[in-house]
Image (cartoon, helix red, strand yellow):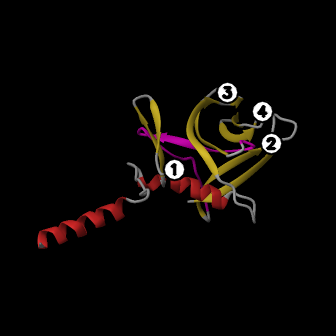
């Protein structure tokens, strides 16, 4: 009888502890939250629920709640002074009118947000491109004087918003 009680308690503890996404750590904890990793020439997302919650809370306009979905890691080439490879985390709203992106750093097969050091701490930038265009109003990366900047591709009715997130 005692064995069954102990086994039941253990199983209940296991179910409760497995419920929900745990913060997954990478090889470089000093880089902050791991966003994904390279697995067999494809990109595997990590900590998606945590990032989705952070973006929905921190980059939504005040008084509004914006929910992002369709998170993916994209590899592309910069526009501007040179054609360099970049990685970004990309997401969109349900209606597709708002798209958001943040630059990523690839280190030992793991993706982390590309950050800048400030007095307030390490920050990364998320860009929002909001507009209903047939083409354009998508996050792009521009190389200017050797630095990479997020922007939105041309569109008549595109509103670009940048938010900095301290991590």
Q: Residue furthest right?
A: 156
Q: Residue at x 68, y 46 (%)?
A: 94
First in sequence: mark 1 vs mark 3: 1
Q: CB atoms at circles 4 and 2 under 8 Å apart? A: yes
Q: Is residue 157 left or right of residue 69?
A: right
The answer for how far apart the CA atoms under marks 2 and 3 are is 28 Å
Q: Is residue 147 above or below residue 2?
A: above
First in sequence: mark 4 vs mark 3: 3
Q: Is residue 167 above or below residue 3?
A: above
Q: Position of residue 60 (x, y in %)?
A: 71, 58
Q: What's drawn in magenta, residue-wise?
A: 96-118
First in sequence: mark 4 vs mark 2: 2
Queried whether the magenta region covers residue 113, the answer comes back as yes
First in sequence: mark 4 vs mark 1: 1
Q: CB atoms at circles 1 and 3 under 8 Å apart? A: no
Q: Is residue 15 above or below residue 72?
A: below
Q: CB atoms at circles 4 and 3 under 8 Å apart? A: no
Residue, disc 4: 136
The answer for how far apart the CA atoms under marks 2 and 1 are is 25 Å
First in sequence: mark 2 vs mark 1: 1
Query: Nearer the viewer's eye, disc 1 or disc 3?
Result: 1
User: In the picture, residue 101 is in which quadrant?
Assistant: top right
Residue, disc 1: 48
What kind of secondary structure does the magenta stretch mostly adopt? strand
Q: Position of residue 75 (x, y in %)?
A: 57, 32
Residue, disc 3: 82
Q: Residues within 10 Å of mark 4 (few under 14, many from 20)?
A: some
Q: Nearer the viewer, residue 122 or 12?
A: 12
Q: Residue at x 81, y 35 (%)?
A: 133
The answer for how far apart the CA atoms under marks 4 and 1 are is 26 Å
């Amino acid at each position: 009888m005692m064995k069954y009680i102990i086994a039941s308690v253990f199983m209940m503890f296991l179910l409760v502890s497995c419920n929900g996404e745990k913060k997954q750590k990478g090889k470089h904890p000093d880089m902050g939250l791991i966003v994904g990793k390279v697995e067999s020439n494809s990109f595997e997302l990590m900590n998606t629920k945590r990032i989705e919650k952070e973006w929905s809370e921190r980059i939504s306009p005040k008084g509004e709640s914006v929910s992002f979905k369709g998170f993916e890691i994209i590899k592309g080439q910069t526009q501007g002074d040179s054609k360099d490879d970049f990685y970004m985390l990309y997401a969109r709203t349900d209606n597709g009118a708002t798209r958001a992106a943040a630059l990523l750093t690839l280190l030992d097969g793991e993706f982390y947000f590309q950050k800048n050091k400030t007095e307030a701490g390490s920050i990364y930038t998320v860009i929002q491109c909001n507009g209903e265009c047939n083409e354009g109003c998508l996050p792009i990366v521009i190389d200017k004087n050797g630095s990479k900047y997020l922007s939105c591709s041309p569109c008549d009715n595109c509103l670009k918003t940048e938010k900095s997130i301290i991590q």
